[in-house]
Image (cartoon, rainbow, N blue to C red):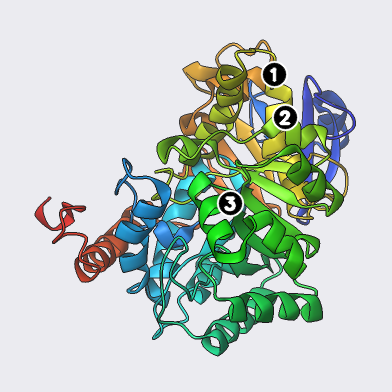
Amino acid sequence: MGPSGALRDAAVHIKDGEIAAVESYERLSAALPQVQVVGDGTGIVLPGLVNTHTHLSEAFLAGLGSDLPLFTWGQEIITPAGRHLTREMAREGSVLKVAELIRSGVTCINDMFVHGNPDSYASLGVAEGLALTGMRGVVSFGAEDAVGGLCDTEGLGVSRILDEQEALFEIASSNALVGFRYGIGTLLGQSDELLAAGAALCHDRDWGIHTHLAEVNEELLEARERWGHRTIDHAESLGILSSRLLAAHVIWVTESDIELLAERSVSVAHNPVANMILGSGVCPVTQLQAAGLAVGIGTDGAASNDSQNMLEAVKATSLLQKVHHTNPAILPAQKTLEMATIDGARALGLEHEIGSLELGKRADVVLAGGTAELATIHDPYQQIVYCTSPRSISDVWIDGHQVLRACELVAIDEDKQIDRCRPLAESLTRDAGLQQRGWSWLSTT
């Protein structure tokens, strides 16, 4: 993913958390005979994948309401669950889903934790969970305080929301691997008072912003009814587009919208699997790229995807554009893999640290191979994008620390984590009424 392109019979030397060399294995092994060698030369070494949009707040909600449109899904599933999420649930759910993310080659995530529990600064648990797992990430609290958005949560006041944003920023600042963005769940889900206060705070603190934008047609209709114009126009009027904005989805856009987003250097997180499950529409990926926008790939949350399998999202990115445009060449495998690595890093403003295998960058590295899926490698880009599943991800390093070794998680005991999370998931779905209303079978299985 760097300027040298793909290298054959090459190796990466990891030292002190960074990439110390990328060159032929023959030269490296001769120069460094005492250094441990991982891999037998038959696999593919690539940069860690960058998941540019997810919701770890949905860690216990996979497989719920997948036949519902977005706003109904939010009101029926996400809103009631969000009122009962706690910091403990956030921490343990984050660890559980990071296990899934690592197994699919992810080394950096951009998370938005959405909750409406006035009694818990629940979003702080995500930063704690990332610290326990060694995952690199950017965290945000996707707050809402007004009826009309994705979550319809009215329990949090403006000052309470801003306090949690400050607290999340502080805990993120204590971990060198974790960054912070100010979260706006949806523009429609925030009162005008909160939108104005948040925009001013981000300007004063130089905070980047993470939000959803132009995701479904209903969003545009409701925005016109509320403000007299669409959400992109409203974001521009608030100065949000100029605040290092990463916008998830960006489906329902016009050519003039795209020009404005490009002019403001907005980054985009494309979430093909979630968009297909919720029937939201098809993101104009190639048009966004042609305009110069950084477009990364996201899994979206565990309830709207309904998994955290990044490799699935990568494959779907290419296939969805091919079938939508009826053109098999519209989004080649190489460009798709760039979206999942260096373009994702660029979308998060991290392209100088991660996203490619280059001298001096942080050692976020993935080794794939050793399975029937990768027994014969003709084209490494196509093999990763179209052929590979999590079972072929054998080893993963984040900042030089190995977090997956020979297909075994290093820092996470998966069996024990499942045991910790099952009762939390059961209490969440019970307290939120999801079991009683027939959405969850958890208490009976």
**Residue drawn at point x = 79 percent, y = 19 percent:** 8
Write down the residue under mark 2.
286
* Pointer 2 with pointer 1, Cβ within 8 A: yes
Kind of residue indicated by mark 3: His
**Residue drawn at point x = 45 percent, y = 60 percent:** 150
* Pointer 1 with pointer 3, Cβ within 8 A: no
Where's residue 353, x and y in %? 81, 53
Residue 272 appears in the figure: yes
The earlier-in-sequence mark between 2 and 3 is 3
Where's residue 255, x and y in %? 75, 37
* Alpha carbons under labels 1 and 3: distance apart: 23 Å
Q: What is the count of numbered marks? A: 3
Q: Secondary structure at mark 2?
A: helix
Where's residue 426, x and y in %? 22, 63
Q: Secondary structure at mark 3?
A: strand
The earlier-in-sequence mark between 1 and 3 is 3
Q: Which residue sits furthest bottom?
A: 159
Write down the residue under mark 1.
330
In this view, the mark in front (2 or 3): 2
In this view, the mark in front (1 or 3): 1
Where's residue 63, x and y in %? 31, 45
* Alpha carbons under labels 2 and 1: distance apart: 8 Å
Write down the residue under mark 3.
53
Residue 363 appears in the figure: no
